Image (cartoon, helix red, strand yellow):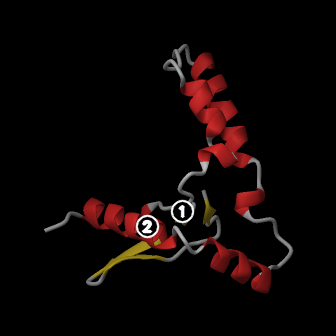
């Protein structure tokens, strides 16, 4: 029997796997229901957070592992998007329900392909 964590991981994995070839559907729906807000996909938060992480590590006296800077630089770039998948963006426990049918994600405000 799967633990709650197992159901959660399986549900997120299923969402990512099933969304792999549906990016055009997402863009079509986004344009149909667009409220003038930028997509999280279009926001520079990933690059900003990657840069901030290195600064935080340095400030805490923690040496970044070799190659971390280069790996972080690839996140969110065309070269780093070999397998972009739809993700909810915020998967904390209060943003999902564990039902008898498995995980049900209920909060998609930060959802995007990444």
Q: How many marks?
A: 2
- Spot the residue most to the right: 36
Dividing the image into 4 quarters, which one contains the N terminus? Answer: bottom left
Which residue is identified by label 2? 17
The residue that appears at 54% across and 71% down in the rendered structure is 21
Return the x and y of residue 52 as percentages of the image width and height.
Answer: 68, 32
* Residue 44, image x, y percentages: 76, 48
Residue visible at 71% across and 61% down?
40
Q: Is residue 71 above or below residue 32?
A: above
Quarter of the figure that contains the C terminus: bottom right
In the rendered structure, the answer to whether residue 61 lies left or right of residue 77 reads left
The disc at residue 114 is none
Residue 37 in percent (x, y) is at: 82, 70
* Mark 1, residue position: 85
Q: Is residue 75 left or right of residue 87?
A: right
Give whichever of discs 2 and 1 has the lower sequence position: 2
> Circle 1 — which element?
loop
Outermost residue toward the left in this view: 1
Mark 2 surroundings within 10 Å by alpha-carbon count, few (fewer than 14), some (14 through 19), many (20 or more): some
Could you say which is closer to the camera, residue 111 or residue 56?
A: 111
Q: Is residue 40 left or right of residue 3?
A: right
How far across and down, in percent of the image, does residue 34 sit?
A: 80, 79
- Label 2 sits on a secondary structure element that is helix
Q: CA distance from mark 2 to mark 1?
A: 7 Å
Are the residues tagged 2 and 1 within 8 Å (C-beta)?
Answer: yes
Q: Is residue 66 above or below residue 74?
A: above
Q: Residue at x 55, y 26 (%)?
A: 68
Compared to residue 79, the image places residue 51 above or below, namely above
């Amino acid at each position: 029997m799967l633990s709650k964590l197992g159901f959660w991981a399986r549900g997120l994995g299923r969402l990512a796997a099933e969304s792999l070839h549906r990016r055009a559907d997402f863009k079509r729906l986004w344009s149909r229901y667009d409220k003038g807000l930028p997509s999280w996909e279009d926001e520079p938060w990933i690059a900003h957070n990657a840069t901030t992480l290195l600064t935080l590590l340095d400030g805490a006296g923690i040496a970044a592992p070799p190659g971390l800077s280069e790996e972080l630089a690839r996140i969110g770039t065309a070269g780093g998007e070999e397998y972009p998948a739809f993700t909810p963006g915020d998967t904390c426990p209060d943003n999902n329900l564990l039902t008898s049918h498995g995980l049900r994600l209920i909060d998609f405000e930060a959802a995007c392909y990444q």
